[in-house]
Amino acid sequence: MKLGIFTDSHYSSSDLTCGCRYNSRSLEKIKEAYRMFENEGCDLVLCLGDLTDTETTYEKECENLRACAAVMDASPIPTLCLMGNHDAFVFTEEAFYEILGQKHRPHTVRTDAAMLIFLDACYYADGSHYGPGGGDWTDTYYPYTDVLQNQLADADRPVCIFLHQNVDPNISEDHRLSNADQLRCMFEESGVVRSVICGHYHPGMESDVNGIHYLTLSALCERETAAAVRILELP
């Protein structure tokens, strides 16, 4: 299976935010990414979150998300899309996937060679989910560790983990899950996790820790498309 992956497009009408995010250019970059994925014969596209960004009105935020959905739906390649913290601070989970279309909601994918597991870490340490209106993005946590541990124990093939926020210990602590150490231990002890692929940390990062490959993609809103997206072929 060949995967096309992008993250952190932060699409909005703003030309520039945070001094480095070219938000309004992202829709064209997403279109360019899909052209690349189609030309490379990808079987599945993954968006790792922060697809859109805030606007002055909720109506405009919905319009932007619908524009992204139109690009996804125009492609013959199916897309699964995780929520990032920016998505969750604008939309409820139900509204996000209602606009995108339920077919874009992540689910565990099994191929002959691997199992793809998607984690939603848009939770505060108290176990509550992020919601519209904004919040502390540095307070990020994955609560369903018992369920995940059971999935890994039952896995009969190599596992790739996907989430928006970061687990890699080489990335700054404010971008990492508060229970990242627990998850890394779980991954290592399982013996089946081969890679963990994330967004969120805009510069990107790639490292190997105790036999697991950690890949964090660069933000699409800050890089040229070819430099930000990844095309990965599962073994």
Image: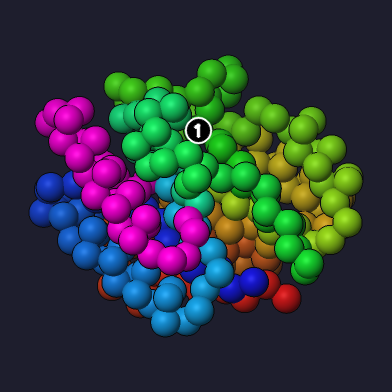
The answer, for residue 118, to whether it is visible in the render is: yes
Q: Is residue 141 left or right of residue 185?
A: left
Question: Which quadrant of the figure contains the N terminus?
Answer: bottom right
Residue kind at label 1, given as amino acid type: Cys
The answer, for residue 88, to whether it is visible in the render is: no
The residue shown at (11%, 54%) is: 15
Q: Is residue 109 above or below residue 101?
A: below
Of 9 and 214, the residue lying toward us: 9
Residue 71: x percent and y percent? 31, 58
Q: Is residue 107 above or below residue 94?
A: below
Residue 200: x percent and y percent? 44, 50
Of 186 and 10, the residue lying toward us: 10
The residue shown at (28%, 43%) is: 65
Residue 67 in magenta? yes
Q: Which image quadrant is residue 148 in?
A: top right
The residue shown at (22%, 36%) is: 61
Q: Which image quadrant is residue 215 in?
A: bottom right
Q: Of helix, strand and loop, which one carries label 1?
A: loop
Residue 67: x percent and y percent? 24, 49
Q: Is residue 177 above or below residue 33?
A: above
Residue 66 in magenta? yes
Instruction: State the scheme by which the image is colored.
Output: rainbow
Dot 1, how many residues are within 10 Å of its Cα: few (below 14), some (14-19), or many (20+)? many
Q: Which residue is mark 1?
A: 122
Of 1 and 73, the residue lying toward us: 73
Q: Which image quadrant is residue 180 in?
A: top right
Question: Which quadrant of the figure contains the C terminus?
Answer: bottom right
Q: Is residue 162 left or right of residue 11?
A: right
Residue 168: x percent and y percent? 61, 54
Highlighted magenta segment, given as a residue range: 50-79
The residue shown at (49%, 59%) is: 78
Q: Is residue 3 left or right of residue 116?
A: left
